[in-house]
Structures are given as structure tokens and as C-alpha cells.
Image (cartoon, helix red, strand yellow):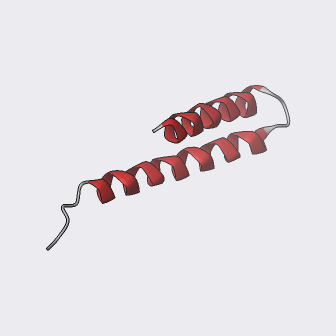
Amino acid sequence: MVLFLLLIIVAVALGIIGAVAHGLLHLLVIGAVILVLDLLYAGWRWQRSGRTPQR
């Protein structure tokens, strides 16, 4: 959970810097990619933890 929140903070910070600073649009793109990957990771962990072990 800490990794998820840390990556969300990093993605938002990179997105803000990339949107505000002139010439740093690549940071906005990197922040968006990190955000998408982080949400996919969280969905994968949530789906995996919801399963019941089969006997």
C-alpha cells in the first residue's frame, strides 16, 4: 500500500511539473504512464487478493 501511495504522489508531482514548466512536457507523459501502471498494479493486487484458495 505504501508503494501504491508513493507512486501516486510521484505521478502527480511529475504531472504538475510537466504541465507548468515550459519544455518539460515529457515529465507530464512520464507521470501519466506511472499513474496508469500504478493503477494497473493496484487492480492486479486487488483481484489476486479477492480469490479464495481452492482445495
Residue 5, position as x, y percentages in the image: 51, 34
Residue 15, position as x, y percentages in the image: 66, 34
As drawn, is 37 to the left or to the right of 46? Answer: right
- The N terminus lies in which quarter of the figure? top left
As drawn, is 50 to the left or to the right of 10? Answer: left
Nearer the observer, 25 or 8: 8
Residue furthest right as drawn: 23
Nearer the observer, 33 or 23: 33
Residue 2, position as x, y percentages in the image: 51, 36
Q: Residue at x 67, y 28 (%)?
A: 16
Nearer the observer, 12 or 28: 12
Residue furthest bottom as drawn: 55
Task: Relative to 25, say whether 12 is above or below.
Answer: above
Nearer the observer, 51 or 44: 51
Q: Residue at x 77, y 45 (%)?
A: 26
- The C terminus lies in which quarter of the figure? bottom left
Q: How many marks?
A: 0
Q: Residue at x 64, y 35 (%)?
A: 10
Q: Quadrant of residue 32?
A: top right
